Amino acid sequence: MKRLLTLLASCALISASAQTVSSPDGDVKVSFSLSQSGRPTYSIDYKHHKAVLPSGLGVRTKQGDMVEGFEITDITNSSFDQTWSPVWGENSTIRDHYNEMAVALRQKESGREMIIRFRVYDDGVGFRYEWPEQRGLTYFVVTDEVTEFAMSGDHNAFWIPGDYDTQEYDYTESHLSEIRALMPKAVTHNDSQFVFSPTGVQTALQMKSAEGLYINIHEAALVDYSCMHLDLDDKKMVFRSQLTPNAQGDMCYICAPCHTPWRTVTVTDDAREVLASNLILNLNEPCALEDTSWIKPVKYMGVWWEMITNASSWNYTDVPAVDIESFDYTKAKPNGRHGANNEKVRRYIDFAAEHGFDQLLVEGWNIGWEDWSGKSKENVFDFVTPYPDFDLPALQAYAQSKGIRLMMHHETSSSIRNYERRMDEAYQFMVDNGYNAVKSGYVGNIIPRGEHHYGQWLNNHYLYAIKKAADYKIMVNAHEAVRPTGLCRTYPNMIGNESARGTEYQAFGGTKPHHVTILPFTRLQGGPMDFTPGIFCMDLSTFAPNGSKVNSTLANQLALYVTMPSPLQMAADLPEHYAKYMDAFEFIKEVAVDWSESHYLLAEPGDYIVAARKAKESDEWFVGGVTDENERTVEVDFSFLPKGEKFEATFYVDGKDAHYATNPESYDIYTKKVDAKSTMKLRMAAGGGFAISIKPVK
Ligand code: NOJ
Ligand code: CA
């Protein structure tokens, strides 16, 4: 009895005042308290700024709300400081250093227990809900998560609409109060119309306050849960979590013991620190694979851009419908536009091999492309049968004789059941035929019908595909899958993802030049992107019927290999376009895809980014700079180089008259000696940039 009284007394004491935990450097502080109604509430301070004002926490479930009526039963504080080495990435080591506060709560009436765990790093905060094993709460259905992020003002934001099925939007830069007016009312994906919440946006959401604070909200370790969007109450400037529903309108089905993904807030007064942040990776579990020796960064070309630009086709015939089980392709009339044919693929192999690439992606190699999209067709691809004009064993052997591999392509057309049913056979087929990397894709409305790309069910599928691929030692680059949340730390065979508007949109009407100055602050926070840079011919009407224009200069395209780091980088343009600009192509050939050190020299979301990186296991450095639609001159300080050593730098810069809209292919190349004391003024044209390769002078 005496012990119980002591415990009760300490509980009363715990709930009387706010509990705080600060980052190791003391700049970030989380305060936690219970409101009068017993609602868990937190706030985040950064130096003397209010990053997140007091904000409510909680989850509603079919089994009862877990939002109010709580008392604190325990608070546990701890610290952690370890350094780990990613299999690939921007740096060869990453420090995982935080202070933690776990608040154990009990809902007085229901007796339910819930822990809210905060991890506070120098670059931000992660917190999540945990449900320990307990009586009275086993299986439960989340109907709403009511996590709030209360902003202290009408911040500037870089946002895309809260669509549950695609992230492939241009970003809008606006104040929070302007989101409602600027939100598109609806879009149509295939045959379905998607209507947006008037103030719902996706994460990672980058904001900047009037006082110069950079606040970024995202999530980490999205496993067995649905993806979180943010819905803004634009009177109060409070975001609330909006989970992706399933076909029945529920959000998640979970079973205690369990926890949500981490909700993350990166906060700093220096934009470069957002780009350098490892918060999301650190909040993920360590590598789950015992042997990672087979995971290798990849630089690749592809029989791809010609299909995207409609200069050739994925499909072999033009018949309107096929049943892949019975259709006889050998008797069908070829359409004469099929891209993935033996002769063409050999030419690409020759070019890619001659210039030192690792792999060649070939899309449209397999049967089923005649009616793959927009038909909600279930049995759409089998992933193992080549078209008659694609001699797979001969081509793979030819590629390997020249030192490169073919890269597999699995477009699923979002027919998930079909893909899962055939997955073992498809991966085994890859192993048998010498493939070790697959680009997968989820175009179109999901089957089972009514599910969304970012719901719990699909998130479980994407991870299932990654884990199963690891069993076969296969690396995966999934397009249209849920946006990354750092899971590549745990499963480093996830070497790429699209999950944002990639270069392909330059062929579908164009993308705003500021896009590449925003993506590293948003989409790339969760992991690398298969952005497919390297376009050298910007007026597509010169070779393709669509006639779109690429809103970028050639030097800007080169810079992307450094400003958009990824262990999977494509040189996306056609060999004949590279052949026209061989001196500039040299940069793509040389640039590394894996790094031992990265430095962000200059950055402002929506305006510009300049980054410098050291290639892994090499003394070579690469620098990239990109700007938005505005021309600007920046001063690059080379003090990232080791002191006392001499280097020769090759500069790839916009030509004097370069401009993304009028003269995108104008560039200059020159060399200069540099060392750690050098500084240099470099001009970037509108939509332009620069790339620098730096080699030690022996
Ligand atoms: C969309 C992907 O983003 C693109 O790269 C691919 O070529 C098509 N789907 C076809 O799978
Ligand atoms: Ca896509």
Image (cartoon, grey):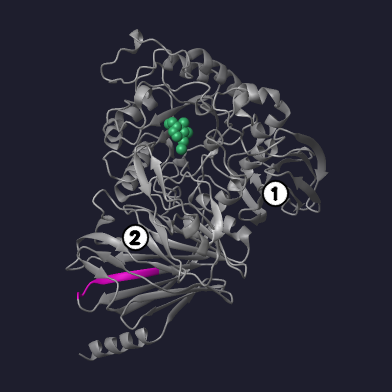
- Residue 153 belongs to magenta span: no
Q: Earlier in the sequence, mark 2 or mark 1?
A: 2
Q: Secondary structure at mark 1?
A: loop
Left or right: 266 with respect to 366? right
Quadrant position of the N terminus in the picture: bottom left
Q: Position of residue 153 (x, y in %)?
A: 53, 71
Secondary structure at badge 2 equals: loop
**Most prominent secondary structure in the magenta stretch?**
strand
Residue ID for mark 1: 630
Residue 203 appears in view? yes
Q: Quadrant of residue 585?
A: top right
Seen from the viewer's position, the closer of residues 311 and 180 is 180
- Find the magenta span and give its range: 110-117
Q: Amino acid at mark 2?
A: Thr
As rendered, which of 346 and 309 lies closer to the eye? 309
**In the rendered image of this protein, does residue 428 appear above or below residue 207?**
above
Closer to the camera in the image, 319 or 457: 319
Which kind of residue does numbered mark 1 sit on? Asn
Residue placed under numbered mark 2 in the picture: 260
Tag of residue 155 = none
Location of residue 17 in the rendering, given as x and y in whole percent from the top left corner: 40, 86
Please state if 241 lies on the left or on the right of 354 as rendered: left
Whether the magenta-drawn stretch holds residue 114 is answered as yes
Residue found at x 77% / y 47%: 682
In this view, which residue lies farthest toward the top? Answer: 331
Q: Quadrant of residue 78?
A: bottom left
- For the residue carrying disc 1, how many other residues have a C-alpha within 10 Å: few (<14), some (14-19), or many (20+)? some
Q: Nearer the viewer, mark 2 or mark 1?
A: 1
Does residue 545 lie above or below 601 as drawn? above
Q: Out of 52 and 464, give the one closest to the viewer.
A: 52
Spatial separation of the CA atoms under disc 2 and disc 1 = 42 Å
